[in-house]
Amino acid sequence: MRERAGVKPKDIAARLDWYNSKLTRVEKGELMVSAAEVEELLRMFEVNDAGEADRLRTLAKEARRRDRPARVPDWAATYVALESAATEIKSYDAELVHGALQTETYARAILSDPLDDTRDVEPAVAERVERGSRILDGEGPSTWCVLGEAALYREVGGRDALREQLEHLRCAARKPNVALQVIPFSAGQHIGLGSSFVVLHLTEPVATYAYLEGLTGSDYLDKPSHTSQYVRAFDTLRAAAASERETLRMLENRIEDLA
């Protein structure tokens, strides 16, 4: 809307008394705007279409409702916000369970930093458990998770913790909005080897993001030339994976092995 109206960032900063970089952060989704600020922006952008104006008001209201202090690193906070707005989540990881489907013990082991044992991980652990509750409450987003078989064997947090995690996955896989598939070792090479990623689909506004995470940062891809490749890759991984029924059988067998 700003670009269409030809409004300069400096004009918005002056009108709303914003610091220089605030507009950039608002447009990237890192900061919320108040209802009064939205109305002023609508006037500056000369938005005369009532439907378009109401849509922006609704988006801003939803954003404020979702906004809460992040208990994750700054570079991961945007992902948490996007996940909370997503209607579809597609996750692939060769070795680890998707964050929102992790148990408290499993998450604590993952989030503990051997390079900094003074960091309090409990807020981040609570964040993951809360995100998982949203997915598993029966009204959460459609969630597809593809795991490498290694995730069934890597004893994150110890043998008992892994067994608890797999039992949790078994319950999650039976939810109507969750689909879980495992790529067996016997599948050999596949397109996901050496990588992990999450694809997020939003319907309001319509958008698709591919999210990649490293040790100290993350990357968000939203151009169709990128996201379409990740969507295709995920579909290919699902085709290479065991069926949902076979995956449940694999989980059952592994849980028995860990008993």
Image: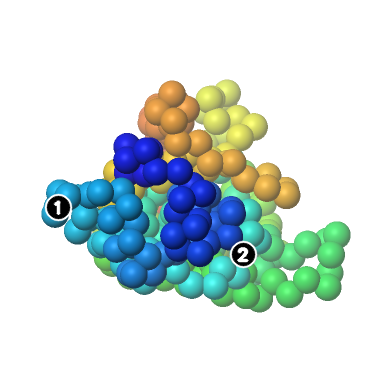
Q: Is residue 243 above or below residue 136?
A: above
Q: Residue at x 83, y 73 (%)?
A: 118
Whichever of labels 2 and 1 marks the residue nearer the N terminus, that label is 1
**184 displayed left or right of 218:** left
**Residue 186 in which image quadrant:** top right
**Residue 74 in which image quadrant:** bottom right
Task: Tell me the crowding category of disc 2: few under 14, some 14 to 19, or many 20 or more residues within 10 angstroms, Cα based.
Answer: some
Q: Residue at x 84, y 65 (%)?
A: 116
Q: Picture coordinates of residue 213 (x, y %)?
A: 62, 45
Q: Quadrant of the N terminus?
A: top left
Q: Picture coordinates of residue 128 (x, y %)?
A: 54, 66
Between 257 and 130, the one nearer to me in the picture: 130
Distance, label 2 to label 1, CA atoms, is: 36 Å
Q: How many marks?
A: 2
* Disc ID at residue 244: none
Q: Quadrant of the C terminus?
A: bottom right
Q: Residue at x 62, y 45 (%)?
A: 218
Q: Are marks 2 and 1 in contact (CB under 8 Å)?
A: no
Q: Residue at x 14, y 54 (%)?
A: 50
What type is the residue that disc 1 sits on?
Gly
**98 displayed left or right of 33:** right
Residue found at the far left of this picture: 50
* Disc ID at residue 72: 2
Q: Is residue 58 visible?
A: yes
Task: Tell me the crowding category of disc 1: few under 14, some 14 to 19, or many 20 or more residues within 10 angstroms, Cα based.
Answer: few
Q: Picture coordinates of residue 85 (x, y %)?
A: 37, 57
Q: Picture coordinates of residue 14 (x, y %)?
A: 49, 58
- Single out the mark in the foreground, 2 or 1: 1
Residue placed under numbered mark 1 in the picture: 51
**101 displayed left or right of 205:** right
